[in-house]
Amino acid sequence: MSAQNDGVVATVSSQANEFWALVVGVWNTSFLGASVGQGLIAMLAIAAALMLRGLISRWIVSALRKLAEKTSNGFDDAVVEALAAPLQLVPIIIGLFIAASILGYGGADTVSARLIQSLIAITIFWALHNAVTPVAHGFDFMRQAFTPVMIDWMTKALRILFVIVGAAAVLEIWSIPVGPIVAGLGLFGVAVGLGAQDLFKNLIAGVLILTERRFLPGDWVKVDGVVEGTVEKINFRSTVVRRFDKGPVYVPNSKLSDNAVTNFSRMTHRRISWVIGVEYKSTTEQLAYIRDKTLEYVLNHPEFAKPPEVTTFMRVDAFGPSSIDFKLYAFTVTTNWTEWLRIKEALAFELKKIVQDAGTGFAFPSQTLYMDDGSEVFLPPEMTASKAKLQQPENAGGES
């Protein structure tokens, strides 16, 4: 009986050992080939990295901001703000690296190593992508050599370039050949290009507009039969022009490149060209007085440009159907529309006063009708018969 009990105990002990060996084996190998303990520690490392991501990134960014505040320019401040978002990936990369080391996946050809390398590449090119704009706008020689729109176009092109290069770097990390993809895109681009000729035409037209500096954002332009308004933005394909009724018009760049564009914002002066008609009864002395006083006002007013910089005159120009016409030609110093209207209004008030002081008046279209009193008055037949009957003697044709 005792021997039988000993056998049962030995069997149970052996089975327990086997079960424990299974538990230990699962514990040591079931977490992606590593032990569960290592997996838990790796998960804790990743969780800690995620929790500390905001704190660490804010600490790094705040430290960089303090360094940037010590300088007088705003260039380094803009760079720090551009790098704030990519820096948030740094704690995650560190956490993944620690987790991979704990799990024993630190080899160069492992999936974890490639994932970490991909995140590093994404961080680097993301930072370059964000830093392009403040770097391009931060250098004085860039602002002097190029217009703001050209700098904006170059920054867009560089940002697209960094995205493409970054994507190619990630593909190379995963041993995906880039050459066949580029060749396939080239064939695809030829097919797309045949159907996108207008797109490339407008793109080239946009480049010509920028190189010729026809207009810049904020300029008041007019293209006959196309649009008139203020330029807001010059894009790759079209230009946004806001009309004076505040409606935006998206004009293809080819329309602005092939047609004549009037840029009113580049006027040196603003013109006033008036035809002023006075009454025909005005004497030559009155006409000379109006001419001299008006010209004296314009030439002595500080808001009007003076010869020989501009042409200015006030002359009797024509004998119109209802008036003797003066031609007033002058330019204001300002090109601002509202200021120009104010100056024109003041000139109109002064002209009204000058004409009144001359003792004459402004002419207006009129007609004169002449009546001839000796002409025969037409009477209807009924009125003629009645008049003849009234004039006939009462006893005409009767007995005497």
Image (cartoon, helix red, strand yellow):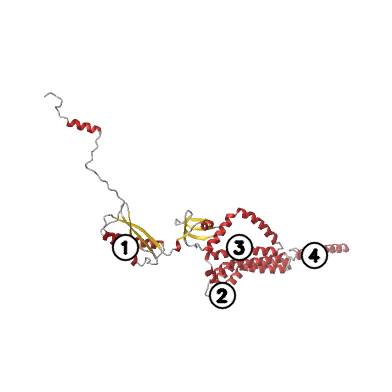
Hey, what amino acid is under mark 4?
Ala
Hey, what amino acid is under mark 2?
Leu
Label whose residue precedes the other's in the sequence (3 or 4)? 4
How many marks can you see? 4
Q: Nearer the viewer, mark 3 or mark 4?
A: 3
Look at the numbered disc 2 and give the secondary structure of its residue: helix
The span from disc 1 to disc 4 (Cα, nearest Å) is: 114 Å
Which quadrant would the N terminus be assigned to in this image? Answer: bottom right
In the image, taking residue 396 as reference, residue 45 lies left or right, namely right
Q: Are marks 2 and 3 in contact (CB under 8 Å)?
A: no
The span from disc 4 to disc 2 (Cα, nearest Å) is: 58 Å
Hey, what amino acid is under mark 1?
Thr
Q: Which residue is denoted by mark 3 in the rendering?
A: 160
Q: Which residue is denoted by mark 2 in the rendering?
A: 67
Hey, what amino acid is under mark 3?
Ile
Q: Position of residue 12 (x, y in %)?
A: 82, 62
Look at the numbered disc 3 and give the secondary structure of its residue: helix
Label whose residue precedes the other's in the sequence (1 or 4)? 4
Q: Is residue 179 above or below residue 71?
A: above
Q: Which residue is denoted by mark 1 in the rendering?
A: 294
Q: Which residue is denoted by mark 4 in the rendering?
A: 21
Label whose residue precedes the other's in the sequence (4 or 2)? 4
Circle 3 crowding by C-alpha within 10 Å: few under 14, some 14–19, many from 20: few
The span from disc 1 to disc 2 (Cα, nearest Å) is: 65 Å
Q: Position of residue 119 (x, y in %)?
A: 66, 66
